[in-house]
Image: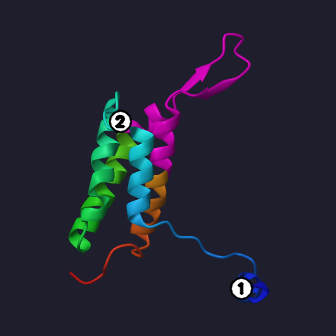
Amino acid sequence: MAAVKEIPVKYFEGNLPHQRCLVHTQLQCQTFLTQRPKTDAGRNLLELVHLLNQVKNIHHRNILFLWLSRFEERFIPVIKERTYSEDKKSWWYTHKYLRRAFQFNSHIRLLISQKSVFPVSP
């Protein structure tokens, strides 16, 4: 068992890469967004999340990338919206779970831009 624990240290210098599969990313985002999101941003993001595992070629990958970019341009003010306490000393994000789901999809967007998630050949 000790040899198994030494593998990350020996080969990855302690930085073992971690990758979350698309199915688990989709399920986690659906959990954060619920089945019937109340905001337009939540409904749009849920539609994009449902498309994650349906991408089969480069063309679909590029379309999904553009849709995620357009979503970010359109809804970033909603995602960054803050609620302040009555004494104005503390704040929190108004749409906490929408923000979490968006952060998962930002990670997917990064992977898509690196062309490491979906197959390269059509």
Please determine whether, in this image, residue 72 is positioned above or below residue 60: above
Spatial distance from mark 1 to mark 2, Cα to Cα? Answer: 44 Å
- Label 2 sits on a secondary structure element that is helix
Q: Is residue 71 above or below residue 8?
A: above
Precedes in sequence: disc 1 or disc 2: 1
Q: Is residue 59 left or right of residue 85?
A: left
Instruction: Please state the horizontal and vertical placement of residue 112, each as a whole percent of the image.
Output: 39, 67
Give the vertical position of 97 relative to 92 (above or below): below
Of residues 19 and 106, the one nearer the viewer is 19
Q: How many other residues sit within 10 Å of disc 2, few (<14), some (14-19) or many (≥20)?
A: many
User: Residue 64 placed where, x, y %?
Assistant: 29, 59
Which quarter of the figure has residue 62?
bottom left
Residue 82 figure quarter: top right
Residue at disc 1, secondary structure: helix
Give me the residue at 45% from left, 51% from top: 28
Residue type at mark 1: give it. Val
Report the residue that reaches farthest toward the top: 86
Quarter of the N terminus within the rendering? bottom right
Of badges 1 and 2, the one in the foreground is: 1
Q: Position of residue 114 (x, y in %)?
A: 44, 72
Q: Amino acid at mark 2?
A: Ala
Location of the C terminus by quadrant is bottom left
The residue that mark 2 highlights is: 41
Neighbour tally class for label 1: few under 14, some 14-19, many 20 plus, Cα within 10 Å = few
Side of 112 relative to 104 (left or right): left
Residue 27 covered by magenta stretch: no
Q: Which residue is mark 1?
A: 4
The residue sitting at 69% across, 15% down in the picture is 88
Task: Tell me where the magenta segment starts and ends, as one range.
Answer: 75-103
* Residue 9, percent from left and from top: 76, 83
Q: Residue at x 31, y 60 (%)?
A: 52
Q: In the rendered structure, does residue 86 fall within the stretch colored magenta?
A: yes
